[in-house]
Image (spheres, rainbow, N blue to C red):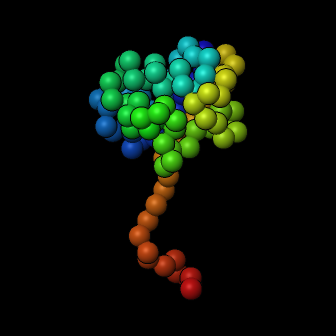
Amino acid sequence: MVEVYLPASLVNLFEGSPRKLPLEATSVGEVVSRLNARWPGMRDRLCSSNGAIRRHITVFVDGERAQAETALRPESVVQIIPAISGGSARCPGGR
């Protein structure tokens, strides 16, 4: 089983979804499908209409950036990370 880590921003949208869960999957796309089967609508938050991971979502498999077609090993760790964005505020000391 692979170990999947979900961001709080996604978990907060889907009641009963945990931050970490084990799943049987052989690819990132299959992880998304299994998540969507448990929590309908999750695929739409993670993927565009063509099945690709959305631009503002980054998926890592065993510490390496991954795509929907990335293969998984039984012991793989899948981390789904949303983009972090902010306004135009400057950092202290920034120019």
Q: Residue at the far front: name it.
A: 50
* 71 sits left or right of 28 in the view: right
Residue beneath the point at 64% across and 36% down: 66
The image shows residue 78 at horizontal and vertical percentages of 59, 31
Quarter of the figure with the C terminus: bottom right
Give left or right: position of 63 versus 94. right
Of the pair 80 and 46, the residue shown nearer to us:
46
Up-down relation of residue 84 to residue 51 (above or below): below
Residue at image location 56% in from the left, 82% down from the top: 94
Q: Is residue 92 above or below residue 71?
A: below
Tell me residue 31's x, y (percent): 52, 23
**Rendering coords of residue 34 (x, y %):** 46, 19
| Location of residue 11 with respect to 25 vertically, above or below | below
Tell whether 19 sits left or right of 15. right
Q: How many marks?
A: 0
Q: Residue at x 44, y 38 (%)?
A: 48
Query: In the figure, is residue 63 to the left or right of 48?
Result: right
- The quadrant of the rendering that contains the N terminus is top right
Q: Is residue 77 visible?
A: no
Q: Residue at x 46, y 21 (%)?
A: 33
Residue 10 in view here: yes
Which quadrant would residue 59 be assigned to in this image?
top right
